[in-house]
Amino acid sequence: MITIQNLTKIFRTEELETSALSGINLQINEGDFLSIMGPSGCGKSTLLNIIGLLDSASDGSYTLSNQEMIGLKEKGRSSVRKENIGFIFQNFNLIDELSVYDNIELPLIYNNVKASERKLKVEAIAEKLNITHRLKHYPQQLSGGQQQRVAVARALINDPKIILADEPTGNLDSKNGNEVMELLTDLHAKGATILMVTHSDYDASFSQRTILMKDGVVFSEKMNQRNVDVFKI
């Protein structure tokens, strides 16, 4: 599904050149659940943003479903994003002025889905995530765990091929965080492809494998079996 070869990202200013990613190689197959870990500033979020087409690489190759992403103009990236990728963020990124229903519905509006179909889709995903009773509420009226469920619903509403999660439990207590990880595990069991950035060894243990990054490179990979780890270095 995703093939990354010799991917680099360089940030330049008038006075400074910083290499955020240096020759990244990565393969993500359909149905994989992959975690990315490493210290702050190692390039985790930069890599996730490039995969999510929120940023562009400086060099290398990134193919999604056999289509080359490097060199796409913003219009092309936006089209691929809408059709293929769902995002879950640490800070939820919900719109406070919109109800839960409207927050979940928004991606469908962007994709020009008919109103009658939008209603059915929102109600179905809300029932699946146990937030039907919250559809008329606003984000500030919800707990952190409930807000993240709304964010997950919004990420899933267009049936994306891949879910990108950036520290999805970072602002949650352990109980709500565990519920979100169990939800992602359930989505994966039903066929979702998930790529998650995390600082938590516990959260990463829910995934099939973990890549460890440092200074813009992948320096090791760990296969996860919840309690049995096999390292490839």
Image: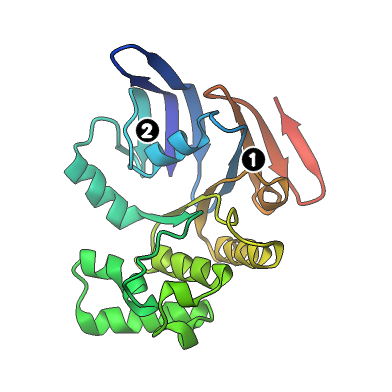
Q: Is residue 100 above or below residue 38?
A: below
Where residue 199 sits: x, y (%)? 64, 43
Q: Which residue is found at the position 65% from the left and 48% from the top?
A: 208
Where residue 164 sits: x, y (%)? 46, 51
**Residue located beneath label 1 in the image:** 210
Where residue 139 sits: x, y (%)? 43, 72
Q: Quadrant of residue 53?
A: top left
Q: Is residue 225 left or right of residue 186?
A: right
Q: Secondary structure under badge 1?
A: strand
Q: Secondary structure under badge 2?
A: strand
* Quarter of the image with the C terminus in it: top right
Residue type marked 2:
Tyr
Q: Which mark is residue 189?
A: none
Q: Is residue 182 above or below residue 77?
A: below
Q: Which mark is residue 62?
A: 2
Where residue 193 sits: x, y (%)? 50, 54
Q: Which residue is found at the position 55% from the left and 55% from the top?
A: 168
